[in-house]
Image (cartoon, rainbow, N blue to C red):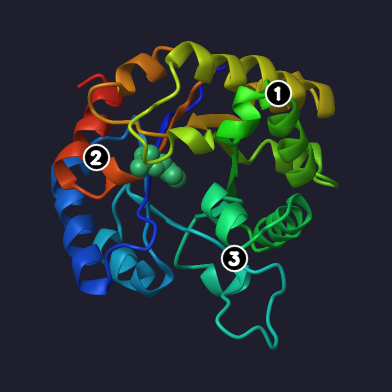
Amino acid sequence: MSRVPIMAGNWKMNLGPADAAVLARDILQETGQVTTVEQILCPPFVSLYAVNDAIRGSVLRVGAQNAHAEPDGAFTGEVSAPMLTGLVDYVILGHSERRQFCHETDDEVNAKLHAVLEAGLVPIVCVGESLEENQAGQTSEVVTRQVQGALANVTGADAGRLVIAYEPVWAIGSGLAATPDVAEEVCGEIIRILLADLYDGTVAETTRILYGGSTNPGNIASYMESPDIDGALIGGSALKKDTYTAMVRVTAGA
Ligand code: 13P
């Protein structure tokens, strides 16, 4: 089964509406004709409308970086999944920065995931071990726990729609990318096999699994050659038109 590769840019807390619209328009101009790679731009909430407006009618897709588990209510400063419908197709959940700085637990990621699916959107669930966990040889245990936790009570039909991103915390923004062999092992031998165990071979084969952590135009090809890596969740390199679109082109083989 061939899975459409994804280049998802997580813009994190960068680019307000005006700057975000400029970057989205620049990317659209550069790689708006590329249809063999799904390009997903994930700006901060306040820039979602501007980016959506800038790429409307194109092949580019928009994602949010978080969503609350409840549909509405007294949750000051939060944004719910139903509010995002019409603005985004994807929602990043459980990013390690949210797990670290906002103390998000696997249970919370799971509740958010159900809310996002309920709203008809596609979750991009982030998992990955810390440096200490890596050094203690706990990668498999941590990633397995995070995937299982995120997917609790999710049906096979819904699981097949998900995107999972393996982002080792030590590789994020550090310049120390996981080697393609290590990334392939986690994406293939841990995550994809876990999906086959939890669901079935079809879910394991259809779910797109991304690698994230210090990817750039120079190393993206080596990840894309790996059979179980279906794309990248990109941080720093997604904030510049030249580096992001170069990664899209490399992935498209253009
Ligand atoms: P970098 O590509 O900057 O390492 O960030 C990765 C990331 O956290 C994407 O979600």
Amino acid type of disc 3? Ala
Nearer-the-camera pick, 116 or 220: 220
Residue 67 has which mark? 3
Amino acid type of disc 1? Ser
Question: Where does the image place residue 114, in percent across and percent down from the top left?
Answer: 74, 57
Mark 3 and ligand 1: say if the CB distance to the nearest ligand atom is below 8 Å.
no
Assign a secondary structure to mark 2. helix
Residue 140 has which mark? 1
Res. 109 image quadrant: bottom right
Q: Earlier in the sequence, mark 1 or mark 3?
A: 3
Quarter of the picture holding the N terminus:
top right
Distance in Å between CA atoms under marks 3 and 2 = 25 Å
Q: Is residue 206 left or right of residue 221?
A: right
Q: Is residue 6 above or below residue 140?
A: below
Quarter of the picture holding the C terminus:
top left
Q: Residue furthest bottom?
A: 74
Distance in Å between CA atoms under marks 1 and 3 = 27 Å
Q: Is residue 113 above or below residue 20?
A: above
